[in-house]
Image (tube, rainbow, N blue to C red):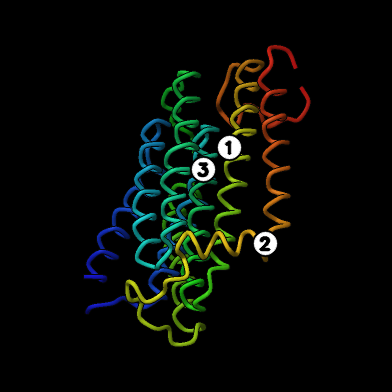
Amino acid sequence: MDAVLFLVFALIAVTCAANLVVQTHPITSALSLIGVMGSLAVLYLLLGGEFIAAVQVIVYAGAIMVLFVFVIMLLNAGAERPAGRSFVARYLGVPVLVIFLGLLSYVIQSRLPASEAVRFGEFQGGAPAEVGRLLFTRYVLPFEVTSVLILVAILGAIVLGRKEL
Amino acid sequence: MNAVPLSWYLILSAVLFSLGVAGFLIRRNIITVFMSIELMLNAVNLSFVAFSYQFRQADGHIFSFFVMVVAAAEAAVGLAIILALVRTRRTLEVDEVSLLKF
């Protein structure tokens, strides 16, 4: 069951990611990215990250992607013009990408110690209570610094969004 | 065939990251380029959560939580910059805004 779930959602994630790269219209890319994020949330659940799966759906697929879709609608962004790509980019891009991927997979398979099988429900540490305890004890300083970062980001967005810079 | 090894998750993460890099390099619409960056951040998050499972500690979850917070801040500021860019230059093509001063 675990293997089936992993394979199905990994396939969805890779397909949506490839679609994001291939499509020329930004709204199609945005919807593909939402597909990637949804299937990644299921994979987080399989790995025992309940809190992070919920945050992935709420913050990433919810808030950030709504912002993206909103900006695409606001700017009325259309499909990009076909590019006059160079010879190297057109004929060597995909093979080089495949070679790079093969190298990465080989390194992961050979250099990592024999990795155990992932069983759903074996790791319980990703529950919201556990993550919250860590956030407010060991990671309390980064957590508070993050709030300053958010404040700066809000101010920056407001300043950049004014009529005249 | 009941469980998959952890390295499969890492390979999936590598695949998604590579696709994000490819999108970053070949797309010329600035919004799509920005979405490719988000895809790369997601791939790294998957690695964090997978290693968190490996070591049976929730620290990786905390890290990916912080990555999400930074991504949200980045999206807000980045999209505001895109809005300002479109207001002054009337274009979304990254090739047409390759000069810092003009």
Q: Nearer the viewer, residue B83 or A40?
A: A40
User: Residue at 59% across / 16% down in the picture?
Assistant: B90
Q: Nearer the viewer, mark 2 or mark 1?
A: 2
Judged from this view, the residue extending furthest toward the bottom is A114
What secondary structure is marked by label 3? loop
Q: Position of residue B28 (x, y in %)?
A: 52, 35
- How far apart, in angstroms, are the residues tagged by discs 2 and 1? 24 Å
The answer to the question of whether label 2 and label 3 lie on touching residues, with beta carbons closer than 8 A, is no
Determine the chain carrying the residue at label 2. A
Counting labels gives: 3
Q: Amino acid at mark 3?
A: Ser
Relative to residue A154, is residue A10 depicted above or below? below
From the viewer's perspective, is residue B54 above or below residue A24?
below
Residue beneath disc 2: A139
Closer to viewer: mark 2 or mark 3: 2
Of discs 1 and 3, which sits in the foreground?
1
Is residue A15 shown left or right of residue B80?
Answer: left
Label 1, on which residue? B75
Task: State how far apart marks 1 and 3 are (Cα).
Answer: 31 Å
Read off the chain for label 1: B
Q: Which residue is mark 3?
A: A86
Amino acid type at image mark 2: Tyr
